Amino acid sequence: MDPASWLGFIIAFGMFFGAIIASGNPLRLYWDLASALLVGLGSFGAVMVATDMSVVKQFPAFMKKVFRKDTVSLQEVIARLVGFSESARKEGLLSLDDAVREVEDQFLSTGLRLVVDGTDPLIIQRILRLELDKMTERHNAGANFFYTWTALAPAFGMMGTVTGMIGMLANLSDTSSIGRGMALALITTLYGSIVANMFCTPVYTKLIERHAQEMMVKMIMLEGILSIQSGDNPRILEQKLYSFLPPKERPVARDDVR
């Protein structure tokens, strides 16, 4: 679980409803089913038009990424790669054959398998970088889903506002309904802003952050795989991989490596 995501949404929506309550207005003034359907489902449908269905189906998976953080320790990844390097230096690359079967990460497993099979380093690099490029495309597709939604939600809010004002202006003879009609017309603008700024934009930003975190892990693995293949000294490999981390996250013995 990612406490930042849960706590952030709780604070954002809590402050919104808290401000309404503090103003003395009843919450029912800010609820209109037709406006909610227009902005919520209407804008979502427009995003579906702009997005491939295979991406839309992954909506639950995207939300899972926002609220659940993969507990991958970069220090543990580095330690494991250094261990593979030590085995390869002492017993040869073929000694990694058994270890590869126990690796759960598909990217690392693929790279080590190519090393054990004696694949040319340039070919290994091309294959693994292609994997990273395709992963980036998949992640961007998910992030762009919410980026598009961010742009469309306020537009649907404005559409609802204009629609409500047309109905209000068509009935100006009933002056008692003008205030209520104006309030309902503005509600859709409010809903559009909520969807865009309190949901879509934070989710989009979080998905971009998740991608950067996963890319960091994969780049460490890629550098480790290539170093193992080239026969680098395990201590040099360890020093090289720790350079990916900020100084405060490196072992104390490596603090001088900046």
Image: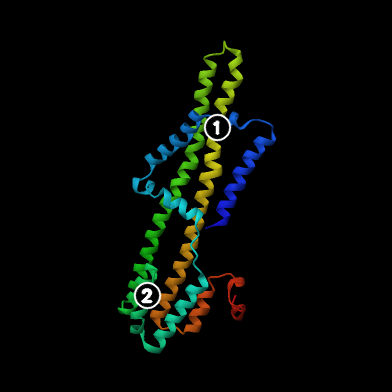
Q: Residue at x 59, y 25 (%)?
A: 183
Residue underneath mark 2: 102
Q: Residue furthest top?
A: 173
Instruction: Tell me the quarter of the image containing the C terminus.
Output: bottom right
Q: Nearer the viewer, mark 2 or mark 1?
A: 2
Task: Name the one closer to the observer, 238 or 95.
Answer: 95
Q: Type of residue at label 1? A: Thr
Where disc 1 sits, the SS reads helix
Residue 72, image x and y in percent? 49, 67
Q: Residue at x 43, y 82 (%)?
A: 85
Task: Name the one closer to the observer, 138 or 227.
Answer: 138
The tag earlier along the polypeptide, 2 or 1, is: 2
Disc 2 from disc 1: Cα separation = 54 Å
Number of the label disc, if any, that sits on residue 11: none
Q: Residue at x 48, y 80 (%)?
A: 237
Task: Name the one closer to the observer, 40 or 193.
Answer: 40
Residue 22, image x and y in percent? 69, 36
Q: Type of residue at label 2? A: Glu
Q: Residue at x 57, y 12 (%)?
A: 174
Report the side of 131 relative to 168 (left or right). left
Residue underneath mark 1: 189
Where disc 2 sits, the SS reads loop
In this rendering, is residue 209 above or below 39?
Answer: below
- How dense is the environment of label 2, judged by Cα within 10 Å: few (below 14), some, or many (20 and up)? few
In this rendering, is residue 118 above or below 106?
Answer: below
* Applied colour scheme: rainbow
